[in-house]
Image (tube, rainbow, N blue to C red):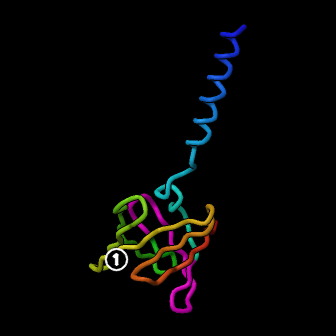
Amino acid sequence: MRAHRLISYASLCLMAVACASNTGPSKQVLIQGAWQAEFEGQAMTLNYGVEQVTVREFGISFPYEWVDDDHIRLNAMGQEVVSRVEFEGQDIMRQTTEGDTQEMRRVP
């Protein structure tokens, strides 16, 4: 009986640790998809793939890469920009570049 309780207790502890360590999708996964943003008063849709972002309205694409867990480096026509990427849930993304923050919303 005592061994049964000990095994049950150990199983509960392992389940609690497994649930606590499940933090959800990474930023590298969350960024993928279409995002609506406004640049200088014009609405644009940015479609992020694994290594490339496409501006739907203009049909142009730029490569990007993850510098670390929080920053991406975008190469837009020879200009490199590093931005900090943060998420509020799964539908709002904020990118901060040189102190300027751009908020984007996920779109279908």
Question: According to the image, label 1 marks what residue?
Answer: 81
Left or right: 101 in relation to 17 = left
Magenta stretch: dominant SS? strand
Q: Position of residue 79 (x, y in %)?
A: 29, 80
Q: Residue furthest front?
A: 2
> Height in image: 71 above or below 78?
above
Quarter of the figure that contains the N terminus: top right
Q: Position of residue 2 (x, y in %)?
A: 69, 10
- The residue depicted at 56 percent of the width and 48 percent of the height is 23
> Height in image: 62 above or below 57?
above
In magenta stretch: residue 43: yes
**Magenta segment boundaries in residue numbering:** 37-53
Q: Residue furthest top?
A: 1
Quadrant in the picture for residue 18:
top right
- The residue depicted at 51 percent of the width and 67 percent of the height is 86
Left or right: 60 in relation to 103 = left
Quadrant in the picture for residue 107:
bottom right
The amino acid at mark 1 is Val
Element type where label 1 sits in the image: strand
> Height in image: 48 above or below 43?
above
- The residue depicted at 48 percent of the width and 74 percent of the height is 95
Left or right: 89 in relation to 81 = right
Q: Position of residue 11 (x, y in %)?
A: 63, 23
> Height in image: 65 above or below 38?
above
- The residue depicted at 66 percent of the width and 27 percent of the height is 12
